[in-house]
């Protein structure tokens, strides 16, 4: 499943056309096949974000035909986030007409929420969310999607308004609450926190501990008193998921903080992705480098994104055979949740 924790958009490009469908691939779209075998019944189709001309739009990968095509785009809207429900039965995506930075302050304009039914491919505009400076999303449960929008108060300069919206998996609005923070007294509202449950169906648990300047990642189980050290890294544990058969653990680490000095490099080092075999008790595959490495697992297939901006791409990897299957590249870049851009934190 996709990560169920909060998707945080700082609106400095860490995230980073007319309504309709197209079954014809652009000549500048590319898909590299490592096998001629159809993946239709094993992997299934999925949606992802890719550039359409100058704006991020929605594409659909067709496993049966080993191809992809443009599903939705709008010349006046940019897709800023695509998020599947944990059970993958529905998918929301959000757009904005513009986002970025004015001086030292971030902004996002005209946010809209859309819903896709993966079974029918039907799309619906759910709600116009509005303008703000910061937006957060999360699947609180398998069927409730939460959006938090922060914005400056129009009358009092030191007030921040926070709107909390919760939608059902069918797009029905369940909650619409607002709160005002006085930043001189209460401080700026902190990003909502979520408890990430990195426990396998068999009870194994992934644990991250910080020892001086490095992060130690352990795997504990009920059958053993001492947790097993899997790896040492300089990045924080970001996400984890077990394969359906429970034989493989996939986890990612991330560092896109201002302390990461590689952000100013041509090839920044921001994330790592690992495949750990519970049978062999070792890491069997690892990727590092740029990007966030959003991922999900379907049967024996690991699907993840990699890289920033025009170099961003999506990879399909068979964790059982330890072999790459496909790489999806689109001119301008693509990703599972957005077309990611290198974070910029100012001077």
Image: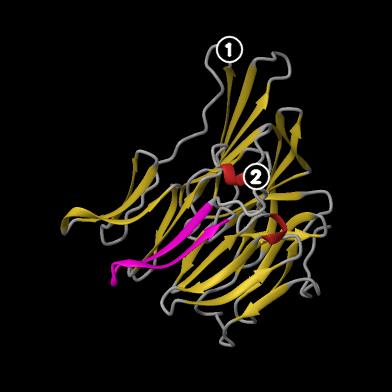
What colour-coding does the image apply?
Answer: secondary structure
Side of 287 where 226 appears, left or right: left
Q: Position of residue 325 (x, y in %)?
A: 55, 78
Q: Is residue 277 visible?
A: no
Residue 205, located in which quarter of the rendered image? bottom left
338 in relation to 32, above or below: above
Q: Is residue 65 left or right of residue 288?
A: right
User: Looking at the picture, how far across and down is residue 9, in whole percent?
Assistant: 62, 41
Residue 70 higher or lower than 345, as above or below: below
Q: Residues within 10 Å of mark 2 (few under 14, many from 20)?
A: few
Measured in 3D between alpha carbons, the distance from the residue under mark 1 to the one under mark 2, in whole angstroms, is 33 Å
Write the residue at 64% across / 49% down.
Answer: 265
Tell me the crowding category of disc 1: few under 14, some 14 to 19, or many 20 or more residues within 10 angstroms, Cα based: few
| Furthest residue in direction bottom, as rendered | 36
> Which is the main secondary structure of the residues drawn in magenta?
strand
Q: Residue at x 68, y 33 (%)?
A: 346
Q: Quadrant of residue 54?
A: bottom right
Which of these two is toward me, 278 or 211? 211
Q: Nearer the viewer, residue 319 or 178?
A: 319
Left or right, residue 295 beside residue 284: right
User: Element under label 1?
Assistant: loop
Q: Is residue 147 magenta?
A: no
Which residue is pictured at 58% across the width and 16% down the height?
183
**Which of the 4 image quadrants contains residue 69?**
bottom right
Q: Which mark is residue 197?
A: none
The magenta region covers 271-289
Closer to the chain start, of discs 1 and 2, is 1
Residue 24, percent from left and from top: 79, 75
Q: Which residue is tagged 2?
A: 264
Q: Which mark is residue 184?
A: 1
Q: Quadrant of the C terminus?
A: top right
Are dots 1 and 2 in contact, CB under 8 Å? no
């Amino acid at each position: 499943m996709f990560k169920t924790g909060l998707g945080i958009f700082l609106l400095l490009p860490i995230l980073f056309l007319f309504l309709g469908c197209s079954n014809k691939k652009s000549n500048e779209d590319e898909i590299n096949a490592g096998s001629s075998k159809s993946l239709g019944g094993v992997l299934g189709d999925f949606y992802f974000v890719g550039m359409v001309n100058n704006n991020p739009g929605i594409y659909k990968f067709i496993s049966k035909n080993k191809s992809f095509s443009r599903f939705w785009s709008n010349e006046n809207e940019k897709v800023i986030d695509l998020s599947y429900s944990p059970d993958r039965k529905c998918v929301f995506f959000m757009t904005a007409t513009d986002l970025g930075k004015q001086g030292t302050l971030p902004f996002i304009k005209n946010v809209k929420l859309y819903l896709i039914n993966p079974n029918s491919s039907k799309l619906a505009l759910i709600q116009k969310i509005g303008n703000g400076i910061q937006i957060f999303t999360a699947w609180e449960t398998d069927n409730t999607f939460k959006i938090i929008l922060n914005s400056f108060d129009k009358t009092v300069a030191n007030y921040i308004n926070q709107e909390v919206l919760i939608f059902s998996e069918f797009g029905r609005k369940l909650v619409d609450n607002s709160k005002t923070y006085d930043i001189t007294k209460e401080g700026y509202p902190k990003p909502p926190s979520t408890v990430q449950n990195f426990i396998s169906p068999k009870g194994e648990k992934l644990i991250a501990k910080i020892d001086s300047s490095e992060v130690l990642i352990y795997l504990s189980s009920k059958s053993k008193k001492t947790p097993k050290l899997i790896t040492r890294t300089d990045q924080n544990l970001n996400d984890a998921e077990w394969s359906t058969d429970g034989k493989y653990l996939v986890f990612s680490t991330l560092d896109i903080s201002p302390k990461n000095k590689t952000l100013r490099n041509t090839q920044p080092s921001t994330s790592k992705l690992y495949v750990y075999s519970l049978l062999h008790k070792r890491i069997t595959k690892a990727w590092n480098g740029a990007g966030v490495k959003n991922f999900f697992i379907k049967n024996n297939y690991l699907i993840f994104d990699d890289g920033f901006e025009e170099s961003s791409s999506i990879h399909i990897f068979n964790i059982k055979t330890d072999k790459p299957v496909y790489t999806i590249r689109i001119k301008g870049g693509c990703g599972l949740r957005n077309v990611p851009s290198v974070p910029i934190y100012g001077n």
